[in-house]
């Protein structure tokens, strides 16, 4: 997902970020601890699950997303991003759905 990286490698995600502003990004609380995520980034959504702050509400926008969706974005915690973040690949079904929701149309590699 949200491969909105600040790395020097060019990625289509760096000019997108739609999936970081479309889906609730929830995961098992222990993953947060394992990745060393600060509690201030998280919202409890069930006894066993947390999500990134900002993805539990509408309009969705992950607290870790910097920049303007569809223009230029990056993820503040890219190296610590969680399983759901890593489960969306540029061009896959979830990606295209998120892009469509932001009026970004078809995927441009
Ligand atoms: S919606 Fe697709 S292109 Fe955009 S950041 Fe997510 S994975 Fe990358
Ligand atoms: S943690 Fe980063 S990659 Fe994951 S949804 Fe938030 S901004 Fe996107």
Image (spheres, helix red, strand yellow):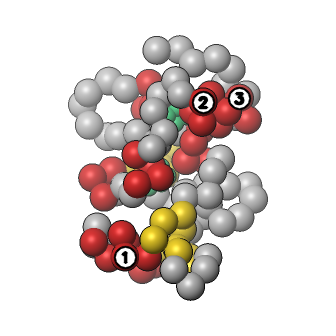
Quarter where residue 62 is shown: bottom right
Residue occupying image coordinates x 65% and y 47%: 22
Q: Is residue 92 above or below residue 52?
A: above
Tag 1 or tag 2, which sits nearer the N-term?
1
Tag 3 or tag 2, which sits nearer the N-term?
2
Q: Residue 24's spot in the image, x, y percent?
A: 62, 58
Q: Secondary structure at mark 3?
A: helix
Q: Which mark is residue 30?
A: 1
Q: Residue 65's spot in the image, x, y percent?
A: 49, 51
**What separation in Å lies between label 2 and label 1 (alpha carbons)?**
28 Å
Quarter where residue 14 is shown: top left
Residue occupying image coordinates x 35% and y 40%: 5
Camera-nearest residue between 81 and 70: 81
Quarter where residue 54 is shown: bottom right
Would you name the residue on which mark 3 appears? 100
Would you name the residue on which mark 2 appears? 93
Q: Residue 102's spot in the image, x, y percent?
A: 70, 34
Q: Residue 85's spot in the image, x, y percent?
A: 45, 49
Q: Is residue 7 above or below residue 26?
A: above
Q: Which mark is residue 95?
A: none
Inspect this view and state whether residue 73 appears. no
Q: Residues within 10 Å of mark 2 (few under 14, many from 20)?
A: few
Q: Secondary structure at mark 1?
A: helix
View extreme (bottom): residue? 47
Q: Secondary structure at mark 2?
A: helix
105 to the left or right of 29: right
């Amino acid at each position: 997902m949200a491969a909105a990286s600040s790395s020097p490698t060019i990625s289509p995600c760096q000019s997108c970020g739609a999936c970081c502003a479309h889906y609730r990004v929830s995961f098992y609380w222990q993953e947060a601890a394992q990745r060393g995520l600060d509690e201030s980034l998280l919202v409890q959504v069930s006894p066993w699950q947390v999500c990134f702050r900002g993805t539990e509400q509408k309009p969705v926008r992950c607290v870790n997303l910097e920049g303007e969706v569809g223009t230029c974005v990056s993820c503040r915690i890219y190296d610590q991003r969680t399983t759901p973040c890593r489960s969306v690949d540029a061009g896959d079904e979830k990606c295209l759905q998120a892009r469509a929701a932001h009026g970004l149309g078809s995927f441009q590699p």
